[in-house]
Image: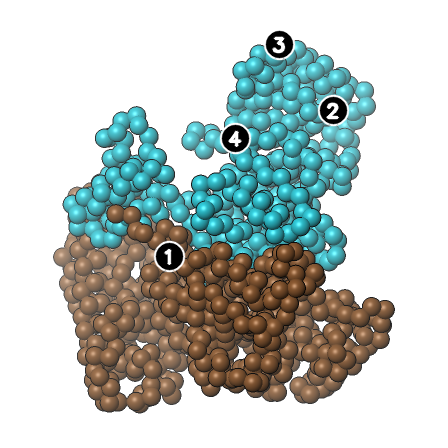
Chain colours: A cyan, B brown
Amino acid sequence: MSFEFQDVGKPKAEVAARRVMERVSGVDITPHFCRIEDKPLDFYSDFSIIVLGLDSIEARSYINAVACGFLEYDSDDNPREETVKPMVDGGTEGFKGHARIIVPGTTPCFECTIWLFPPQVKFPLCTLAETPRNAAHCIEYAHLIKWDEVHGKKSFDPDNPEDMQWVYSEAVKRAELFGIQGVTYSLTQGVVKNIIPAIASTNAIISAACALETLKIVSGCSKTLSNYLTYNGVEGLHTKVTEFVRDKDCLVCGPGVLIELEKSVTLKKFIDQLEDHPRLLLTKVSVTHRGNNLYMRAPPVLEEMTRSNLELPLFDLMGGIPKDIINVNGMAGKGDGKQSCLRKLRVVFKGVDGISDIDMAGGA
Amino acid sequence: MAEPKTKYDRQLRIWGEQGQTALEKSSICLLNCGPTGSETLKNLVLGGVGSITVVDGSKVEIGDLGNNYFVDESSVGESKAKTVCAFLQELNDAVKAKFIEEYPEALIDSNPSFFSQFTLVVATQLVEDSMVKLDRICRDANVMLIFARSYGLTGFVRISVKEHAVIESKPDHFLDDLRLNDPWPELKSFAETYDLDTPDPVVHKHTPYVIILIKIAEEWAKNHNGNLPSTREEKREFKDLLKSKMIASDEDNYKEAIEASFKLFAPRGISPSIQQIINDNCAEVNSNSTDFWVLVAALKEFIANEGGGEAPLEGSIPDMTSSTELYVNLQKIYQAKAEADFLVMEQRVKKLLKKIGRDPDSISKATIKSFCKNARKVKICRYRLIEDEYNTPVQLELQKYLTDEDYSIAVGFYILLRAVDRFAANYNSFPGQLEGEMDEEISRLKTTAVTLLGDLGCNGSTLTEDLINEMCRYGGAELLAVASFIGGIASQEVIKLITRQFVPMCGTFIFNGIDHKSQLLLL
Ligand SMILES: [Zn+2]
């Protein structure tokens, strides 16, 4: 995309939409200037394909869960074609990049191959506090330790140049104290904001690959990428296609975790069970069934409206059917690693007609 | 204070001020500004090259609106070069943008000296005949050249430069230059001042792994006739020995030593690729030698003399668990050795320059320093003339590609991309461009391709019907998404060539837009 100097400060979505429509007649682009999490789920369900231009693991995880959330399986555990919402994703860093196609239920989803995105390594606090050895250690000391000591509750704002300047000068002081070289303003910004170096040409290569795959999926004019392309232009030029495989037990794109319940279990009891479930460990749960809010933790007005459901049996809330998919939204994981997530659950009620042992077998 | 160049902040983090300056000094010529050409140039304009000159003789047509982002409805009938140039200028006003309304083919024939004013020429969508002529012109004028072409779901990128030398190749993963298996006297005596059996647990867990490995290696060598571990079994034993020296389970420095022990096991001396460079004929310097080869000649002397088989020390060490004081002191030991090596190299460079009749100070200290720091990583890329490749491709490689399943589609496209130009020369259109004659076109293209294969000495080799059909289906179309990919690759290589950083690709890149199994063909 091309932005100009006069565009600085304006919403990217709006500028991009206007630019493309000016240049290419006949296209209709609706910009949405908001966080991806702010859109209701049915906003996303209206599209036949989702192309991701995201820059974080969290955002990718979120959209992936949304797209996989639409996926339904038939009784043979095959994905129902009309519920499959393909995604095209890409990312770059310097002279390297990747592009991939995610067809939920067929190719691995983002979560199946989450190991491709190792978490960022953080410096141990004791290194920062006691044995700094390089410029980055001094910068992180100023940013993570010294800032709080001096400013107390006022939190650091990476977009405020004064705050950045303060961290920079504190880092310089610390570096001088320990005889460490190399603290610059530019490095300070890079470390504190975790700036990923980016160049136009790599972005062009990866976005072109994403656009081409999207066009091929939509038009059916050719075979598509199967399913993960990597590009590396650091030393010569290397492109590689890897066919990753799905994790059959994936919590996000699989048929859903199977949960067996007595007909009498209330919604509240069901929610409590999710917290102890070894594969889920879900807290702060909201529950929807076929688009109906059974219990919503937020906003307060919805919470109040749905609170009375907590004491009712889930079986009744779901309309008295023997088994169905329930979507829950909550925090997963333990301790510091807690993350907001969407989960699909296959709820089956015991002792209801129409359920045979065969249906129960092979649960995830 | 905040640096002023915030516009280029993210790319400066990759190629630095020096790379940016090189881009700003460069002058780029683009031949043909269809989608492939304008997409290539877009990335270079955003990167901040000094000037661009767009050469295209055609007018904007309705058909261009569907695949070129740098023309619009109001420009139909206008010069395409002028229109594209104006839209590109909007992206970055620091770039000087010019255009010439002339067909590149005509310019190549009528005014070959035109090209000598540029740093680099990007030639897009040229047919073989013009490519061959332009290649000769640029080679003689010492102008860098890159070809890019999009064709349906395929296309290629090919650099043509006589020789490209890279000092700052900036590889992602490269063995740290620690000299653990052959420490120089100062490093050795520095290590000797530390006692690994110190009773102080705080000191014990803050001794950097460099010192641990040097000392344990010495202990090992004493018990093994002066040798270091070489067999798998010995390496395992050595790691066990390291483990046995730990006095607490949380000693990260010892864990790092075990992980880094492969750095100790690495062979001494220079790598085969550096060996090849110092053995190159160009390392015998004369008054025509470039600075790079003078530096290589000095390196060759250094390795044979003061270096004792090693290149100058790089002088930096990776981060490792350590007390600050010990780490900083260790850093100083490495820096001092690197500085001493640099001074020796500097003297050798001066002497060589004098010998070949040049000013002994004509290569700057900064250049020599950068060369020393990167001496183990320098690269040379050479490219055949297109004409030579097309007339006499490397038979061994060609045969390999034709029979290797991984390469069959790429080499098929390579042949067909040439065959369509022969086809066009005979029939005045690309195969599949005319409606209603598909079957005939397919068989004509097949005949052309078979003849071409014969000319290349590959009698009996054939291409699959599927691929020939596919090529005819393209009808010479230039798709924007493919052009943008090809243009992206081409601009990436241009940046590497101009900044003289990172390593440009060798051979011909054949794009496979069907399943992205693209390949580089070294012919
Ligand atoms: Zn998955």
Determine the CA span between mark 2 and mark 1: 57 Å
Please, which chain is the residue tagged with disc 3 on? A
Which one is in front, B166 or A165? Answer: A165
- Specify whether B210 is left or right of A246: left
Please provide percent x and percent y for residue B37.
57, 66
Read off the residue under disc 3: A308
Read off the residue under disc 2: A323
Determine the CA span between mark 4 and mark 3: 24 Å
Which one is in front, B106 or B384? Answer: B106
Please provide percent x and percent y for residue B432.
78, 70
**Mark 2 vs mark 4: in front:** 4
Read off the residue under disc 4: A340
Residue A351 is at least partly visible in this image: no
Tag shown at residue B82? none
For residue B87, above or below residue B144: above
Asked if disc 3 is less than 8 Å from ligand 1, the answer is: no
**Mark 3 vs mark 1: in front:** 1
CB under 8 Å between discs 4 and 3: no
Read off the residue under disc 1: B12
Do marks 3 and 1 share a subunit?
A: no
CB under 8 Å between discs 3 and 1: no
Please, which chain is the residue tagged with disc 4 on? A
Q: For the residue labelled by badge 1, is the local secondary structure a helix, a strand or a loop?
A: helix
Q: Rate crowding at label 1 as few (under 14), some (14 to 19) or many (20 or more) other CA atoms within 10 Å.
A: many
Determine the CA span between mark 2 and mark 3: 23 Å
Do marks 2 and 3 share a subunit?
A: yes
**Mark 2 vs mark 3: in front:** 3
Which one is in front, B490 or A287? Answer: B490
**Mark 1 vs mark 4: in front:** 1
Which one is in front, B370 or B105? Answer: B105
**Mark 2 vs mark 1: in front:** 1
Q: For the residue labelled by badge 2, is the local secondary structure a helix, a strand or a loop?
A: strand
